[in-house]
Amino acid sequence: MTIEDDISFLESVPLFRLIGRTPLRVIAMGAETQIVHEGDVLFDNPDSIDAGYVVKHGRFGLRGHAENDSKFIAGSGALLGELALISETAKPSRAMALELSTVIKIPRSLFLKMLEGYPDAALRLRDHVAARAERTMGDIAKLKTVLGPADAKS
């Protein structure tokens, strides 16, 4: 694949679509493509990770640390480790390849340098994250109303 193909693919990821084509060129040129074999672990709880991963081909199972945690499937175009792109974080889940897969690894240092170089992209990203946080807080407030006060007795 060419850099242009990688840029087009990254534009299909909703978060990266916000950034714009020129900043995505920086990411595409500095990112690393990795092959992950079936059964291999991309990252594991509570590993600290310093990169985000975009699933290019294949599928990953995501599961929390506890045996009874739900399992989610992430396929092509999924962004794994989104928060690791902007801050140091430990993964609350494990990502294991369910088949031969390819990911684009985007190191945090590359992502942050790109944001420094493209402040408009950083502002769009900030606004998106703030709106998402506001929606999440609204959802929590609604849930609190449904469940009632935390100190209520049954």
Image (spheres, rainbow, N blue to C red):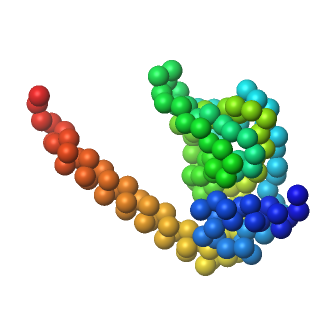
Residue 40 horizontal/vertical position (percent): 74, 29
The answer to which of 98 and 133 lies nearer the viewer is: 98
Where residue 98 sits, quadrant-wise, is top right
Quick check: 26 left or right of 133?
Answer: right
Instruction: Count all numbered tags in the image, as a single digit.
Output: 0
Q: Residue at x 19, y 49 (%)?
A: 145
Q: Is residue 7 visible?
A: yes
Q: Is residue 51 visible?
A: no
> Residue reaching furthest top?
67
Residue 118 horizontal/vertical position (percent): 67, 76
Q: Residue at x 11, y 28 (%)?
A: 154
Residue 111 horizontal/vertical position (percent): 69, 61
Quadrant into which the N terminus falls: bottom right
Quick check: 4 left or right of 41?
Answer: right
> Residue reaching furthest left?
153
Q: Residue at x 51, y 21 (%)?
A: 67
Q: Is residue 144 above or below residue 1?
A: above
Q: Residue at x 47, y 22 (%)?
A: 68
